[in-house]
Amino acid sequence: MKIPKRIQPLVDDGLVDEVKSQLMSGKEASVYVVRCGESIRCAKVYKEASQRSFKQAVSYREGRKVRNSRRARAMEKGSGFGREQQEKVWQSAEVDALYKLAAAGVRVPEPYGCVDGVLLMELVTDEEGYVAPRLNDVTMSAEQAIEDHLVMMSYVVKMLCVGIIHGDLSEFNVLVDEYGPVIIDLPQAVDASANNNAEWMLERDVNNIREYYGQYAPELLTTDYAKEIWALYEKGDLTPESELTGTFSQIDTEADIAIIMQEIDAARNEERYKRERIKEAKDGIDESKYNWTDDK
């Protein structure tokens, strides 16, 4: 096929030898099947910001840091240079996440580098060598659904343990090869510790996956892995080996609230005590007559 304009520089540099076909065109990128020497890979060409239909970019970018102060200031001001740098950060986010997640034991396509807004990475195939189908196009038994759902929950945990939330996880962003699920599409990956939207994004990701597998194993629809995982994460108890139950008890949460309310009451009592002492100092009242441990 005709070489797309954005891929031509990679052909000129010898990184790509042939563009075989277009695999898909999505809201943020177009993906092509390419030949690199004797290897068949895919090239993900990110669309310009003005062409993307992804409307919630700001909520996903929250918390992403840039080391270069000049770049950071330009991005905050929204200048032309700043928008260009923002695009580079957006594109590099997926490459960074792929390397980080692969090291954490999450199955993702192997990246080979990103050049001028084109990400070269592994082409995930099925056992016959064809492009692996999306989870959305796969049917399965109840037993397989339960097994693969558990695998996906383990991936979510491993991702969160290295500070990453997918942010747009669903049956459309998971491929299935002969070994099981492979997570794809990570340019909107969220920094769990720095993004104020992290909790609800994790919950949406987990519940999307639950709803899909729940079509084949309805018992999964009553699970609550999202709240369980986030509760462990907030307490600092989440590890890649955490054993999940799929249930979430409100008891701990209620206990935490009770402790918080006690602290609030104590702070109010302390403030009341200070105000009364100031008042008595002014009025010349003997404070020894009062028991200040009693709030009644």
Image (tube, rainbow, N blue to C red):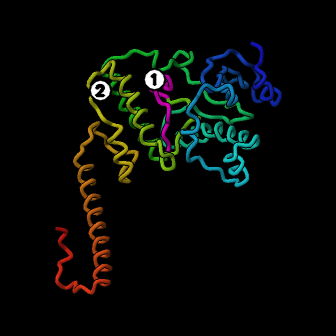
Res. 139 image quadrant: top left
Q: Is residue 242 left or right of residue 247?
A: right
Task: Report the side of 218 relative to 66 (left or right).
Answer: left
Q: How many marks?
A: 2
- Residue in the foreground of this view, choosing between 233 and 281: 281
The three-letter amino acid code for the residue at tag 1 is Glu
Residue shown at the point (58%, 41%) measured from the top left: 61
Q: Kindly indicate whether the residue at mark 2 contacts the one at mark 1 (C-beta within 8 angstroms).
A: no
User: To which residue does mark 1 refer?
Assistant: 171
Judging by the rendered image, the residue that carries numbered circle 2 is: 221
Can you give x and y, in whole percent of width and height, for residue 271 in the image?
32, 70
Q: Residue furthest right?
A: 12
177 w.r.t. 78: above or below: above
Where is 46 relative to 264, above or below?
above
Cα gap from disc 1 to disc 2, whole angstroms: 15 Å
Numbered range of the magenta stretch: 164-182
* Residue 132, label in figure: none
Q: Residue at x 55, y 33 (%)?
A: 56
Tell me which amino acid carries mark 2.
Leu
Return the x and y of residue 25 as percentages of the image width and height: 63, 19
Give the camera-side residue of 72 and 18: 72
Task: Check if residue 169 falls in the magenta segment.
Answer: yes
Instruction: Check disc 1: other Cα within 10 Å, few if <14, some if 14-19, many if 20+.
Output: many
Quadrant of the rendering where the N terminus is positioned: top right
- Left or right position of 77 against 285: right
Residue displayed at 62% across by 34% down: 111
Task: Report helix, strand or loop for mark 2.
Answer: helix
Percent coordinates x, y for residue 5 in the rendering: 78, 22
Q: Could you say whether the residue bearing mark 1 is in a helix, strand or loop?
A: helix
The image shows residue 3, relative to residue 161, as above or below, that is: above
Q: Which quadrant, please, contains the C terminus?
A: bottom left
